[in-house]
Amino acid sequence: MSALLSVSGLQKSFGAVVVADATSFDVASGEAVGILGPNGAGKTSLFNLITGALKPSGGRITFDGADITASSAAARCKMGIARSFQIPQPFGGMTVFENALVGATQGAGLSGHEAEQYAMDVLDQTGLLARANTRAGTLTLLERKRLELTRALAAKPKLLLLDEIAGGLTEAECQSLIATIKDIHAGGTTIIWIEHVVHALMAVVERLIVIDFGKKIAEGAPKPIMESAEVKEIYLGVDPDV
């Protein structure tokens, strides 16, 4: 598989707080990669750098063969990078369908019947079709999470970034959402997923990247990474000498 996303030597800090410390990794087309790290490690900032919400002070980002380091967030979205947010941000006064339609028109650039049909198809894929005419502000937490996923998918992304989408859900709700994400990935969508619910990541991703204070400290297959002494010490707070 060829690299869809390549992050090379990425640097970003806010004063003394470093959120990207020479960060480098590749994500292959069709791959699902998980990102772990303690609170404040720089995970969401990394997403903001990839999507263009933040500009790096050094390094390079390449997407689908093009250097996007200086590209705007809007340009990156049109190229095929979409994300969900940790705290769902639906257009509360609009229906679920209208929220999906915004993604299809503004993200994927569709119009008319094509946009409407695609929005309905994505709602079906994410399990929200029966709620299409419901006002988004009345949805349950799980439904709002699904709507975040819907709006990102409606943009027809080549790369889907998920930011703690399983957070706050019950175990049954989490398993339901995992099944949906598995189906999306099985359909060929490339995914990078930040998550504190480790078992959710382990159920989907093929590779884990662990960061701390903006620095990549481990990368590899999920099981060996979670069993490594360094990751247990930094992420899980386990003393490797005990």
Image (tube, rainbow, N blue to C red):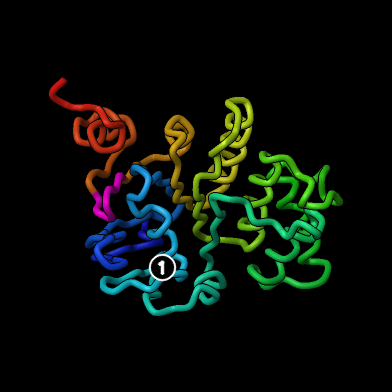
Residue that sits furthest to the top in the current view: 242
Residue span colored magenta: 210-216
State the image coordinates of residue 9 (x, y, percent, origin top left): 23, 65
Q: Residue at x 52, y 76 (%)?
A: 75
Assess whether residue 18 is covered by the magenta stretch: no
Q: Nearer the viewer, residue 156 or 14?
A: 14
Q: Please tell me which residue lies in front, 119 or 46.
A: 46
The residue furthest right is 133
- Foreground: 120 or 215? 215
SS label for mark 1: strand
Instruction: Specify the farthest residue to the left.
Output: 241
Quadrant placement of the C terminus: top left
Q: Is residue 214 positioned above or below 205 on the image? A: below
The residue at which mark 1 appears reads as 63
Q: Position of residue 134 (x, y in %)?
A: 84, 49
For the point 29% across and 74% down, the residue is 57
Neighbourhood count class around disc 1 (C-alpha, 10 Å): few under 14, some 14–19, many 20 upward: many
Q: Residue at x 56, y 54 (%)?
A: 84
Q: Toward the viewer: 218 or 85?
A: 85
Q: Amino acid at mark 1?
A: Phe
The quarter of the picture where residue 92 lies is bottom right
Q: Is residue 57 above or below residue 154?
A: below
For the point 71% across and 42% down, which residue is it?
143
Give residue 101's position: percent from left, percent from top.
75, 63
Label total for image: 1
- 215 within the magenta span: yes
Q: Is residue 78 left or right of residue 43?
A: right
In the displayed structure, would residue 51 be above or below residue 173?
below
Q: Position of residue 90 (x, y in %)?
A: 69, 56
* Main secondary structure found in the magenta portion: strand
